[in-house]
Amino acid sequence: MADESSSHVIRGIDWKSTFPFTQIFRSFRIAIHPSKIILALLAMLLIWFGGWFLDRVWPASNSAVPNELGIYGESYMDALPRNAFAAARLQVWDTMQADYKRRLTDYKVNSLGDLKDAIVKNREKEVSDARAVFEKAKSDSAKRDAAQITLSNAIRGAYLNAESEWDEAVLEAKGVGLFKTFYDYEIGLVNSTVVGVRHGDWFGPTGVVSSIRNFFIVAPVWAMIHHWFYFTLLFLYFLFVWSIFGGAISRIAAVHAARDEKISIRQALRFSTSKFLSFMSAPIIPLLIILAVGVVVAIGGLLLNLPFFGPIVVGALFFLALAAGFVMTLVLIGTAGGLNLMYPTIAVEGSDSFDAISRSFSYLYARPWRLAFYSAVAIAYGAICYLFVRYFIYLMLTVTHFFAGLLVFYSADNAGSLWNMLWPSPSSLGRLSYSINFLSLGPGQKVGAVLLAMWVYLVICILGAFAISFYFSSSTLIYFLMRNEVDATELDDVYLEQSEEEFTDSATITTVAGGEVTSMSTVTATAEGEGAGAVTPSTESAPTQEGT
């Protein structure tokens, strides 16, 4: 019979220690914190306005054609020659220009501005003709209701046709902005990833894996090859904003995850600006290494131009090129796989870009499948959280639209509801975003529509801000887990900055009370670890002296 003292009763299970990946499920609670959302919102708005500005100043001849990335994706995946895509794009562009010139000829105008006036004038003529028909038919009371419906339909049709024709004319004349093309394509892949997780489609043509692959390959390769100067400028601007605000979000997430404490936005921005060069250079240094090694290999290839001896020398020394290719491949895979760990490294350790690169590469190559598993969990959980926030915002805007327009009976010029013209209901569109039909609104109505759109899109942008905040929060938690797995470092170990007051010794305080003199020494600050300070109080009482 077993001894009663040897029996054990399980009171509970520490799931976080038994299944470390469950730490990733803290990402939503960390990401939803207002300070991170505000920083992410500011970053997103700054990036969007920067891209919008570049699209406005960039020559129309260098813009994208409709569905350019879709065309490029098909040619890329089918391994077609590079000139096949260029030929397809040029064909679409030539067709657009021919249609635009034909439209100018049909309306007998010479510019896009004159074309807009002509389209509006033609629309007003159609509306006037429809009203004239109605005036003739309304005298017959039996046909009056039918004539009213016909008039309303004719007016709506005239306004819709004018709007559609104007949109097509602008598209034909200016093309599509490169930033807009890139942004819309990448956002579409994010949505495809979310839908794939929701439906369990991980390996289908539009599933999670394909969407993630296209996100990191198709659009970036298209940008680097076909519009390299534009996207170099955009990338540097993006990295500038990302370093400041992304670094600040990572810092808040690091302290929050490790110590369950929340630092202020000012403290986070102070940290990111002090580490700006580290955040900025961490993703760039590996790319520069690849470029430098590639240039050396390319220079070596010049030997092939030498007659007779060139091919012999290249053939004999080609193992050096293969070694260089091996190094470039290691760096490329390390950058792609460890990129998400670079910012958390700096935020958690308070270190520099070289430490960020070293740790991210080390953790990737030491535990690649563990990192892949953590990433998959973060993607699946992030998709669920993204859907929750999206439906929350969708319901919020739908309810607001319904009650705000409940007592609005005024009609717009196109015989439609003025409220729906100012802001179409998300429930009728089936999406959050919308476009304003300025051709159907009067001057005051246009201003009101713009102001409404400003507030509505600010709310919509919170969804994107959450996605950014979740990305940095989950990446930081994954970094903690990988560091614990590889380096056996505790999850609550994080670099903490000390304020100047903690390092400054205060003067000795002497009090005289009741004939007693008491001397108290200062608080001594000592630094432990990599800048993490521990404040140790030390008090000494002087012997009590009797007054003379």
Image (cartoon, helix red, strand yellow):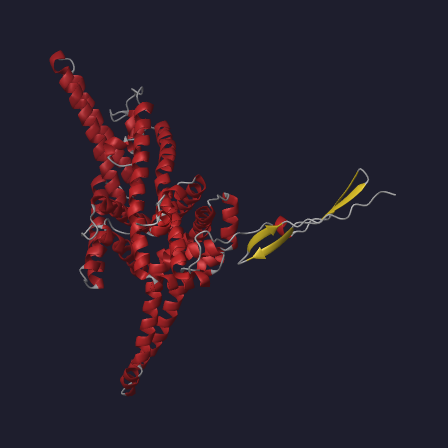
When the figure is inspected, residue 88 is found, relative to residue 262, above or below; the finding is below
Determine whether, in the image, residue 312 is placed left or right of residue 143: right
Nearer the observer, 135 or 25: 25
Query: What residue occupies the far right of the structure in this picture?
Result: 548
Whole-percent x, y for residue 198 in the image: 23, 43
When the figure is inspected, residue 173 is found, relative to residue 142, above or below; the finding is below
Determine whether, in the image, residue 265 is placed left or right of residue 20: right
- Where's the C terminus, which quadrant? top right
Nearer the observer, 545 or 247: 545
When the figure is inspected, residue 393 is found, relative to residue 55, above or below; the finding is above
When the figure is inspected, residue 461 is found, relative to residue 65, above or below; the finding is above
Whole-percent x, y for residue 306 in the image: 30, 84
Query: What residue occupies the far front of the structure in this picture?
Result: 1
Total marks shown come to: 0
Residue 131 in view, yes or no = yes
Give the residue displayed 37% in from the left and 46% down from the top.
Answer: 470
Determine whether, in the image, residue 30 is placed left or right of residue 534: left
Give the residue displayed 33% in from the left and 31% down from the top.
Answer: 396
Nearer the observer, 483 or 189: 483
Give the residue displayed 19% in from the left and 61% down from the top.
Answer: 84
Whole-percent x, y for residue 98 in the image: 21, 49
Give the residue displayed 25% in from the left and 27% down from the top.
Answer: 414
Residue 306 in view, yes or no = no
Determine whether, in the image, residue 496 is placed left or right of residue 312: right
Whole-percent x, y for residue 543 in the image: 77, 48
Query: What residue occupies the far left of the structure in this picture?
Result: 142
